[in-house]
Every structure is written in C-alpha cells, then in structure tokens.
Image (cartoon, rainbow, N blue to C red):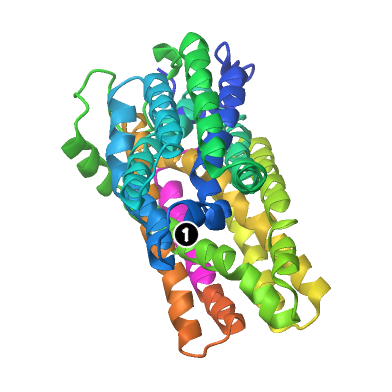
Amino acid sequence: MKSNNEVATSPGNSLPRGAWLVVMFLFFVGALNYIDRNMLTTMRFSIIDSIPMSDAQFGMLTSVFLWVYGLMSPLAGYMADKFKRSHIIIFSLLVWSVVTWMTGHATTFNQLLLSRALMGISEAFYIPAALALITDYHKGPTQSLATGINLAGVILGSSLGFIGGWIAEKHTWNLAFNSLGIIGIVYAVVLSLFLKDAPKDDISPVPNSGVEENEYKISFINAIKNLFNQPAYIYLLIFWSLLGLVNWMIIAWLPTYYKETFNLSQSMAGVYATAYFWPASIVGLLAGGYLSDRWSKRNPLARVVVPIIGLMFAAPTILSGSLTNVLGITVAAFAVYALTSKFTDSNMMPMLCLIVDYRYRATGYGILNMLSTIVGGLGVYIAGAMRDAQIELSLVYQASVIALIACLGILFLVLKTAKKRELY
C-alpha cells in the first residue's frame, strides 16, 4: 500500500474517476452554504419590520448560529470519518435547506432563533466532510488546488449574501429563504444520484503511522488520542485559532475602518471593504493551491512552505495598510493580505493529510473549525472592546500583526516536525 507522499510523487499518477466532478458539485454546495447562512444580515430592516426585535436580539440570531456551528464541528468531523462522507454532505445540504425554507415561515423571534440554531447544527456537518472527501479523491499534485476551488465556492457564497437583501427589498424577506431552501432541496436530490465516496483502495494511511487498514475501529476517543498525540496537530490547532482571530477581526471591522479613517460614506466604505477583498481571496485560494501542487511534485512539504510564504507577505502589508492615510495604499495593502493569507486555507486540509491518520482527517478539521470559529468571534468582540476603550482600529490592526508573526513561528514548528517524520 502506498503512502500519501508516494502517491503524490508517483509518475503517471491518475485521479479516481469523477475526481474533478466531485469538486464541481461541492463548489456549488459550498456557495449555497454561505449564501444561506449570511443573507440574514443583509435583510435586517425587512425582518425587524416584520418581527419586531431589539438590536441585541438580532445580533443573537448570528451569535447562536456561530456558537452551535462551532460546538458541533468536532462531532460533525467524526461522523464524516465514521460514515460515508458523501452521505453526510447530502444529508447536511438537505437538512439545512429544509431549515432555510422553514426560516421563511417564521413569525416570531423564538422561531427565528430556533431556525438559526438548527442551521448551525446542519451546516457544521458540511465543511469537514467536503474537504475530507476532496482529499480522498485528490491525494497527489491536485490536492491543494482542488481544496482551493471548493473554498472559492464558499467565498463566492459569502460575496453573494446581498441577494437576500435585494430579494427582501424588492419582494419579501420570506421569499428569499423559501426560494433558496427549495433550490437546496432540489440540489440535494441531484447530489444523491451522483455524489459518491472515493474508492477505498485509493485511500491510504498517513506515512510512518504504522496503521494498517483494519488495525482498529474508528472511535471518537481514539480519534482524540490519535490527534493530540501528534505535536504538529497541536501546533496547527493553535495556528488556525490565531489566524481565525486575525481574519475575523480584520474582516468584521474593515468597513468601519475605511469609513472613519478616510471619511467615506457607509455605502462607499462597504464597497472599499468588499469589492476587491473577496475577489482577491478567491485568487489567493486558487494561486496558493496551484503553487503548492506544482511544488509538491518535488517536495510534499510545499503544503507547509507555501502558507509560510503567504503570511510573510500578509503581515507587513497589514502593518503598512494601517500606518498610512493614503486610500490607494491601504486598498492595495489589504488586497495583498486578502490574496496571500488565503494560501493557508487551500493548504490546511492538505497539511492535515501530511500529519494525521487518514481515518481522522475530518475529525481533525472539525476540531480546528470549532476553535477557529469560537476564537474568531472572540476577536470581533475584542476589537469592539478596544474601540470602546478609545483605541483606534489602526492600532488594533497593527496589534494583529503580532499574531500573524506568531502564526509564522508556529508554521515553522510544523515544518520542523514534518521534516523529522521524514515524510519526503
């Protein structure tokens, strides 16, 4: 049985049948996932006009989603390791689409709150299963690009969240949820006919793990022990949490930063904060995946080196962007950050494939996802608290550079640990 890296470097290595079709299917699932979760924030006035609530209550609708989503992620990852990943994906899409449709029929705040909690549960099962399925199909020099394409669908869905607000303004907010819910249900039926797990013979354990195909049964306790016995996994856990804190802190407050620093209107600040940021992020996902895949043909540790290079550009650009009062320089700096910071996203699951046993890839990513979401939410709050203490956002962003430098140091530890395992 070949190791992951032997497969990655074998000449003439061919992909399982339908490998790129799986990526295409999941691209659209990821887009639907993020449209459904994000569009609520774009129709605030329409919803409050229909269901009176305080700003705190409206904020709670997003908070409860994030809390439930984060807490459910480890279990969701484990379920994707225990059962067929394709079934988990289809079931997740079906359930959250039904919940999306039900949201459109809510008439009270409590019903909306319940629907957001249910959406958090159902959507948590998607990302770990999807990324694990993609890496099952793409084990060699297409792994990072395939992952990046899938996550590009997620970014596209985030940028299309405005569709909900547009439909709510032109018609009703209920129509937006009802329509997208039905679209998701239909797509889940289509996926049930075509989406399959990768052939078992094409999946192999992590190199040097000493694990044979039937050596032990999958269990959650064994998964936790297996993952946390790997120093490199613990490093990645800290790394992904810190990066999540920085990313959420920057993205959530960027419109406010532009408005206050350059005296822009609310609408123009929103344009400067998003019009280039999401397209640059998509380019970064694809570029980071492509570069890593090309380099990994000679050195599989490129999955770690490419994110290091990305952060080496991201950290100084955030610093320069927050030190200047020239709008063009700030826009260029944050565009570079959006691009190069995404080198990590397209390589995170491939990095896990280098480190953890293949049976626990989804569980490992689920735990990463949980901490990143929780710490990211904390980062948004910390930035707000610092503003309440009369600390300017430019100083908040400059402080975030320290966290990015720490992330770089942690990745070097991952690289050092991976070299000791003689993965190449």
Confirm whether the magenta stretch covers residue 302: no
Residue at 47 percent across and 40 percent down: it is: 349
In the image, residue 368 above or below residue 142: below
Question: Can residue 52 be seen from the camera position used here?
Answer: yes
Q: Position of residue 282 (x, y in %)?
A: 68, 45
Confirm whether the magenta stretch covers residue 410: yes
Q: Amino acid at mark 1?
A: Gly
In terms of secondary structure, what is the magenta stretch mainly? helix
Q: Residue furthest left?
A: 221
Q: Position of residue 164 (x, y in %)?
A: 60, 44
Residue matched to label 1? 244
In front: 170, or 122?
170
In the image, residue 330 above or below residue 178: below
Q: Position of residue 352 (x, y in %)?
A: 43, 41
Residue at 36 percent across and 42 percent down: it is: 115
Q: Seen in the image, is 217 located left or right of residue 159?
A: left
Callout 1 secondary element: helix
Magenta residue span: 403-424
Q: In which quadrant of the rendered image does the N terminus lie?
A: top left
In front: 217, or 1?
217
Residue at 78 percent across and 66 percent down: it is: 332
Residue at 62 percent across and 29 percent down: it is: 142
Q: Seen in the image, is 199 located left or right of residue 336?
A: left
